Amino acid sequence: SRPIDFLGVNYYSRSLVKAADCKPLDYEALHPQGEYTLMDWEVFPQGLTDLLVRLNRDYGAPGIYITENGCAYEDLLTDDKQVHDVRRIAYYKAHFVAAHRAIQQGVPLKGYFAWSLMDNFEWALGYSRRFGITYVDYETQERILKDSAKFYASVVAQNAVQEG
């Protein structure tokens, strides 16, 4: 009953379901063809645009922040201590473009937070999934910026996604 300052949105993927034939309120999860993360989540940036536009239309929050958005992929540390996570960069780039499309449709998007700054302990899967834009060597605790961290920093510095 009180006005809100902003609405926070966590978006990773969409879920598609259809009604099951046998029981009321039962459903079957669909698994369309496309790209999937290591979490088996479909990469579907259009869903972010659709969600933001719908939330703005239905609730009209004074501001919306994407409080979590990210992906887990297999990250390989090279001998020269680099992580070339091109799939994560593509994921973020596509989702930044999707967020920009929502802004163009009038969504008052005020901020975007990548999940996550560093690889961490995932509540259900421990250390087996890496979401971070910073690689964590769990034995030494050394932190190494992945290519996605450098990409993210360039987007923030320019307030734009560079084509190409």
Image (cartoon, helix red, strand yellow):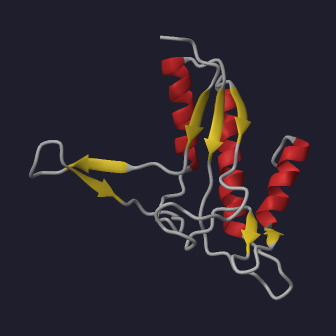
Q: Is 16 placed left or right of 56 in the picture?
A: left
Side of 143 relative to 90 (left or right) = right
Residue 92: name its quadrant.
bottom right
* Residue 21 image position (x, y, % from top left): 12, 51
146 horizontally vs 158: left or right: left
> Can you name the residue that lies furthest to the right here?
157
The extreme front residue here reads 140
- Residue sitting at x 77%, y 62%: 148
Location of the C terminus (image quadrant): bottom right
- Give the percent coordinates (x, y) of residue 61: 59, 19
Q: Is residue 135 visible?
A: yes
Is 125 above or below relative to 51? below
Task: Name the residue furthest left.
Answer: 22
Percent position (x, y) of residue 6? 63, 24
Q: Nearer the viewer, residue 42 or 137?
A: 137
- The image shows residue 140, relative to residue 157, as above or below, that is below
Q: Residue at x 50, y 60 (%)?
A: 123
Instruction: Look at 64% across and 38% down and name the residue there.
Output: 66
Q: Quadrant of residue 157?
A: top right
Nearer to us in this view, 49 or 142: 142
Residue 162 seen by the camera? no
Q: Is residue 27 above or below residue 112?
A: below
Residue 10 in the image: x percent, y percent? 56, 42
What residue do we see at 49% from left, 63% from top?
34
- Count of all numbered marks drawn on residues in the image: 0
